[in-house]
Amino acid sequence: MFSTKHICLYFAILSTLWKENQSIHESRITLSNTNLRFSPGNYPGQILSTFIDENNLLMSCVKICNQNILCRIFDINGVLPNQCRIFQGDINLHGTIISSSINNSQVGVIQFSNDLYAAYGQPCSSTLPEDRYLVCGGNFTWTCPQNTYWNPTISMCSAQSPILGSTCQQNLSMCRADLTFTCLQFNQCGPLSLSMGTTIASSTTQIANSPTTGLNYPYSIIVNKTTDNSIIVANSGGSQVIRLYDYNITTNNVSLVAQTWSGGNYLGLPFGIAIDPNQRSNLYVSDYNKHCVIKFTSMQVTTPMPSVVVGICGTSGTGTNALNTPGEIAIDSNGTLYIADSSNNRILKWKPGNPNGTIIAGSNVAGSNSFSLYTPRGVFLDENNSYIYVSDSNNHRIQRFSLFGGYPNNGTTVAGGNGQGASNNKLNTPFAVYVSTKTKALYIADSVNHRIQRWSQGAQSGVTMIGDPSGSSGNSATMLSSPYGIALNDDETFLYIADTGNHRIQRVQLI
């Protein structure tokens, strides 16, 4: 894309501008092929100036770029004839080269080398010659110019990122502070507000048709990915399931979905919830205390009445017809349920109408090898890739199993598995896992560490999205207390958290 020739004229300009400073080193400018222009990742944050020159556009553009210490990229004839545009940023990280419909359009890139930064960190004063690449800092040492940072890997000043959500490294100033960006604890550039949660329901929230007020130890949460994106919560301490809305303020009410129904029936401790993907008004709820899964048709309790579809309500067991303190549940496109049968240390697959389930992971005996589970609490179904992810809570890991792995099923550890702890390669009793359909990253409710971890596929460690990276609990906007449930909305712009110990639902913006 870039030609091998450099702009010799540029050196003549440098010599003319700074001929009194013989010690100044020269950078080079490389020109792209024609009919190309620069497309910045953040136009308002990168554009430095534009001007029109109908006589000698290239030479004028080079001159103006050279006079601006922030300039690293320019283009000519990119969007308008005879126009020069001057940009800051890194050509490889903060934008792309795209085609232009204007003939003779080109992109110029300043090429730097580390010998230009040999004086970095050395003493400076106003009596020393001017330097194009370093500035004399407040402590009278040569330092990087505005909107750049010292990159020790290449021993040069690199451009800070102006792009929200771009990757950054802690302890390096890689993000544009003038845009209020910092390197957040999950290693992305953005404002500090992205490390804070917004409470959308709490212990004081009024619940329509409920005999009690507010949330009481909410365990699980799902988003009903329909036009209204209603949020369903297992309000476990209140022995009820509720529905609330987040997007539309006019319908931002909270209502009771299920608690009691005729015949003296009631929910004991609702834990897992799932919605039929083909009939999105049909709700399934696992009752941890009653050892069964109940179906609520049309999310109501009258006509038809709720029905037990898995297990024997009120009785635990180890047979494949029974459950023992079931945790989270999932459902596939065929209506088959997948159940974290926690105290039985197994995952059951239960087809509609069948009197028995099939063990697809773990067994009735707790263990820590790749075939075993130890009190699994959460499940996430990735039907498109034929995987089920399991929060193997007391093994402090996330296991991935093939849906067609047979029995015994050999699992793969995809997060944690390094013992119990709060370091970034460990988990402590994870209760839930959610896999992004966009990035395939895992979001983990690292419950006893009071944090939400994001763990990229194949990574050896995770990053903390919200909560204390060191594992302490709290009730501020940046803290959590024993989060049990997590869910993403349809376009994955928000992460919802059942902040169980704080009796609230938190919303966190994703970038």
Image (cartoon, rainbow, N blue to C red):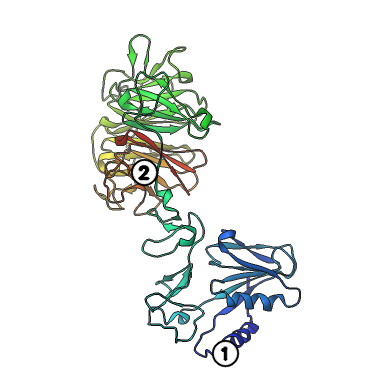
Residue 461 in view in this figure: yes
The residue at 48%/65% (across/down) is 160
- As displayed, is residue 479 above or below residue 237? below
Q: Which mark is residue 465?
A: none
Q: Amino acid at mark 1?
A: Lys
Q: Amino acid at mark 2?
A: Ala
On screen, residue 193 versus residue 101, left or right, reads left
Residue 340 in view in this figure: no
Identify the residue under disc 2. Answer: 477
Query: Could you say where residue 88 lies in the image, as x and y percent from the top left?
Result: 55, 67
Query: Could you say where residue 9 lies in the image, as x and y percent from the top left?
Result: 65, 84
Identify the residue under disc 1. Answer: 19
Q: What is the tally of numbered marks visible in this picture?
A: 2
On screen, residue 182 versus residue 314, left or right, reads right
The answer to whether the residues at label 2 and label 1 have Cβ atoms under 8 Å apart is no
| Label 1 element class | loop
Between discs 2 and 1, the one toward the N terminus: 1
| Label 2 element class | loop
Which is nearer the eye, 338 or 37? 37
Report how far apart the C-alphas of labels 2 and 1 lie in the structure. Answer: 56 Å
Q: Looking at the rendering, which quadrant does residue 185 occupy?
A: bottom left
- As displayed, is residue 47 above or below residue 402? below
- As displayed, is residue 375 above or below residue 88? above
Q: Quadrant of the N terminus?
A: bottom right
Which is nearer the eye, 28 or 324? 28
Query: Could you say where residue 479 lies in the image, as x and y percent from the top left?
Result: 33, 44
Query: Could you say where residue 33 lies in the image, as x and y percent from the top left?
Result: 67, 71
User: Quick one: label 1, few (<14), some, or many (20+) residues within 10 Å?
Assistant: few
User: Quick one: label 2, few (<14), some, or many (20+) residues within 10 Å?
Assistant: some
